Image (tube, coloured by chain):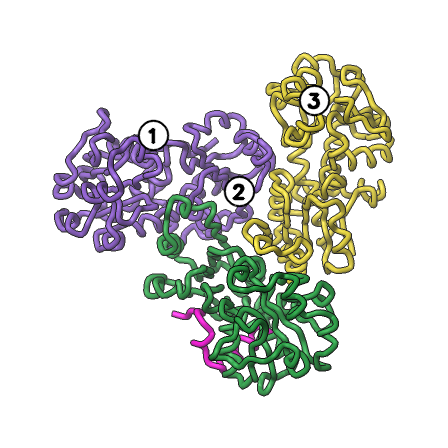
Chain colours: A purple, B yellow, C green
Amino acid sequence: MKNLLKLSDCSIEYINKLLDKSELCKIGKYDNSCINKIVVNCFFEPSTRTHYSFQVAQEKLGCKVINFYPHDSSILKGETFYDSIMVFDSYSPDALVIRSNENEYYKQLLNKVHCPIINAGDGTKDHPTQSLLDLLTIRQEYGKFDGLKIAIVGDIKHSRVAHTNIEVMKRLNMDTYISGPSEFKDESYKYIDFNTALSEMDIIMLLRVQHERHSTQMKLSKKEYHEKYGLTKERVALMKKHSIIMHPAPFNRGVEIADDVVECEKSRIFKQMTNGMYVRMAVMHEMIGE
Amino acid sequence: MKNLLKLSDCSIEYINKLLDKSELCKIGKYDNSCINKIVVNCFFEPSTRTHYSFQVAQEKLGCKVINFYPHDSSILKGETFYDSIMVFDSYSPDALVIRSNENEYYKQLLNKVHCPIINAGDGTKDHPTQSLLDLLTIRQEYGKFDGLKIAIVGDIKHSRVAHTNIEVMKRLNMDTYISGPSEFKDESYKYIDFNTALSEMDIIMLLRVQHERHSTQMKLSKKEYHEKYGLTKERVALMKKHSIIMHPAPFNRGVEIADDVVECEKSRIFKQMTNGMYVRMAVMHEMIGE
Amino acid sequence: MKNLLKLSDCSIEYINKLLDKSELCKIGKYDNSCINKIVVNCFFEPSTRTHYSFQVAQEKLGCKVINFYPHDSSILKGETFYDSIMVFDSYSPDALVIRSNENEYYKQLLNKVHCPIINAGDGTKDHPTQSLLDLLTIRQEYGKFDGLKIAIVGDIKHSRVAHTNIEVMKRLNMDTYISGPSEFKDESYKYIDFNTALSEMDIIMLLRVQHERHSTQMKLSKKEYHEKYGLTKERVALMKKHSIIMHPAPFNRGVEIADDVVECEKSRIFKQMTNGMYVRMAVMHEMIGE
C-alpha cells in the first residue's frame, strides 16, 4: 500500500519523481486522469491552502471529492478520530487525505485503512506536501538544491513545516540554518543571526508567529517581534541579489513580514501556493492513478 | 411521486427489491447511472454515516451533489425549515435527502415539493435507510429473515432506528425483543433480560447510550451502564456460535460496547456502514434512475 | 477581463442580453457548456438562495465547484479577506464568486485577481445577480419594463437589493417608489404611502425587516410593523388585478408578510428563486463560457 506520511520515508529519487510529475501537472498532462476515483478530505484542523489546494487538485484530476466537516458530524456526539476515519474507510475510497493536530495520528490507522493515506499535516511533526511545494519552488528558482543556503526564521520547535523541510534539505545538501528569537534555538540545528542571514542566504523562509501560543513563552509583543525579526523593506534591501523570500502562510502582515514585502519582487509566497496545487495533483496521482 | 418516508409504507416485496438492487450496486452495476441528476442533501442534525454515505452513493451514481449546511445559511437570519427546503425545491432538483429532529417533518412538504423526498431520519420516528442497511447485513449473514431472533438493547423509546427496525422485522417474521435498562421497557414490545438475550439471540443490536439525554431520566452512570449492559468480551463469549453484533453507530466505547468488541469477529458494525452506502445507492437510483 | 461587480456598470443592452441568455438556460441550452471550468464560491456572509443557486447553476453548467467555508479556514488564524482570496487566485480558477459585508470589497482585488469576479453581494451596496433575477421575473410577467410602477417597501437604506434595483429600474423607465416606515425615507427617492402603493403599483417588492438591526433605530415591534406595513391578505385584496408581490427573501412570516400571502396567487417569491438559478447560469456562462 502506498502512503505519504512523512517525507523522511521518501528517497531523494522518489522526491524528484514527484517534483517532475508536479511539473507535468502544471502543463495539464494529468488533467482528468483519475476519473471515478473517490477521495475523502478529512481536516480536523482549520486550513485554507492545504485543504483547498487538495480539493482543486483532485477536481483537476477528475476525482469525485468528498469533504468531511467534523463540526457537522457525529464528532459532536463524541465519536472519536479513529472511528470517524473508519467510517470513511468502510466506503472503500481510493484515498484519504487527513490533517489532525495529533502527532503521528496515522500510526493507529495503518493496517486498518484499506487505501492510501496522504498526510496533510500531523501536529508538530510532518507536513510532506508543504515541503514538496517548497522544494518545487526552490528548484524552479535555482534549478538545483545542492549548496543552496536557507535560513528558516521563527518558531522552529512547533513548526511541522520546519521539521519536514530541515530533514529533507539536509539530504539534498542544502546548507540549512534556523534563525529568529533565541528562545526558539534548537541544539540539533545550526543557528544564524537574523541580520547575517539576510545578507548570506539564498532563501529566507519565514514562519508564522503563532501569537496565541507564543504569548506565554515569548516575551515579545507583535510590535517587538516585527522590529527585531520582521522582514521589512529595509531588511529585504540587505538580501543577496537573486535571493528569494518564502513563507508557508498564513502570514501575519506587520509581524513576521511587512505589508509591502508580501508581494514584493523577491517574494515567492503566492507562487508557493500555486505549486502546492501541482504538487498535490502529483501526489494524488502517484497514490491513486494507474 | 416516489418518496421514501418510512419503511412501514413499503411492502416486503418492495423492500426485497431494494435489497436486491443494493447487491447490484455493490458489484458496480449502477455506477454512473444517474449522470446529470441533481440531488440536495439537507441535514439539519449532525451526521457522519448517513450524510457521507449518501454523498458517496450519489457520487458513485454520477449525480451532481449539493450539500446544504444550515449553519452557513439564512437559517441564521431566522429562515424556517419549510422555507429553506422550498428554496431548494425552487431549483427543481431530482431528489431531496432530508434529516431533521422534527417528527414527520415531511408532512408539511408533501404536495409542495416537486421531487422525491428521501427521509434520512426524522426526530424519534423513522430512519428507513438505516433499517434497510440493517436488513441487508442480516440477509447477507443468514440468507433469510424468517425466524431469526434479535434483541435491540438500549433506549428504544428515543431511537428511530429501533422503531423502524422493530416494525419491519415483525413483518419479516423475525422474533424481535427489546432489552437493557428496565426504565426503557415499552409495553408494546417483548422485553428480554440482557443475559438471557446473549445466549439465545442470533443478533444483538446495541443502541447508542445518549448520555446527554439519559442523565436526567436514567440513574446509571456510564460506568454502571457498562457493568450492567455493556457488551464486553466476557459477554460476547456467552453469545451463540453464529450470532452477530450490530450497532447503528456512533458507538460509545466503554459504555454500551467494550473497546475490544467493536472490531471483534462477531461484529458487523463496519460492514453495516459499507452496506449503508450500497443501500443508499439503491434508494437513490430507485427514486431518480430511469 | 470581464467582471460583474455592479449593475450600474452594465448597459441596458448588456442586461437584456443576460436576461435573454437566462431564458435559454431555462430551456437547457447551456447545460454542461462549461465542462472543466473551475469556479470558487467565497461567501463571507451566510446565504441560502444566492450561494446555493450559484452552486446549482455551476453544476448544471458542468463546472468543477469549490466552496470556501471561512469558518473552517485560516481566517480563524487571522488571515485577512484579501489574503484568503489571493490563495484561491493562486490556483488559477476560471471565476470567483464573492460575497462580503464590506462595501466594494472588490476594489482591492481588481488588477490583482486573474479571473472574473462575480459580486454576490457587497455590504449595503450592490447585489447585481439579485437585481437581474428580479428583472427576469418582471419581464416574464409583463413582457416589458417601460412604465411599470413598483414600490419597494422597507429599509431601503441598508438594502443592497433596493439600491441596485432602483438604479437599474430608473434606467429601464420604470416608475420607482419607496415605501414603508417614514424613518427609512431617503430624499433621493420618491416616497409613496403604503396604502396608496397597494392600489396603484404593478409590483409590490417587500424587503426583509432586519429586526436585529432595526430594534435600535426603529420604534416598531414586529407586531406593530406587521400591523402598519405587513402585507396581509386584506391588503393583497386592495392590489391591482394583475399586480404581483416580490421579496428577495429570506422573509419574516408575520412581520413584513403574512403567512398566507407568501404562496398566494400574486406572489412570485419562489419564482424569483427559480429565476435566480437561471440568471446565475447566464452570468457564469457569460464570464467563463467560450
| Mark 3 secondary-structure assignment | loop
Depth check: give the residue in front, C278 or C135.
C135
Amino acid type of disc 2? Tyr
- Packing grade of label 1 (10 A; few <14, some 14-19, many >=20) is some
Q: Nearer the viewer, mark 2 or mark 3?
A: 3
Query: Residue B232's spot in the image, x, y percent?
Result: 66, 16
Q: Is residue A102 visible?
A: yes
Residue C285 in sight here: no
| N-term-proximal mark, 2 vs 1 | 1
The magenta segment is C1-23
Question: Is residue A118 shown above or below B288?
Answer: above
Identify the residue at image location x=41%, y=52%: A29
Q: Of residues B32 and C209, which is closer to you in this image?
A: C209
* Comparing labels 3 and 1, the label whose residue is closer to the camera: 3
Q: Which residue is mark 3?
A: B219
Q: Is residue B22 left or right of residue A31?
A: right
Chain assignment, label 2: A
Residue for point 43% across, 30% down: A102
Front-most of residues C216 and C33: C216
Judged left or right of residue B142, residue B173 is right
Q: Residue A8: which disc?
A: 1
Q: Mark 2 = which residue?
A: A69
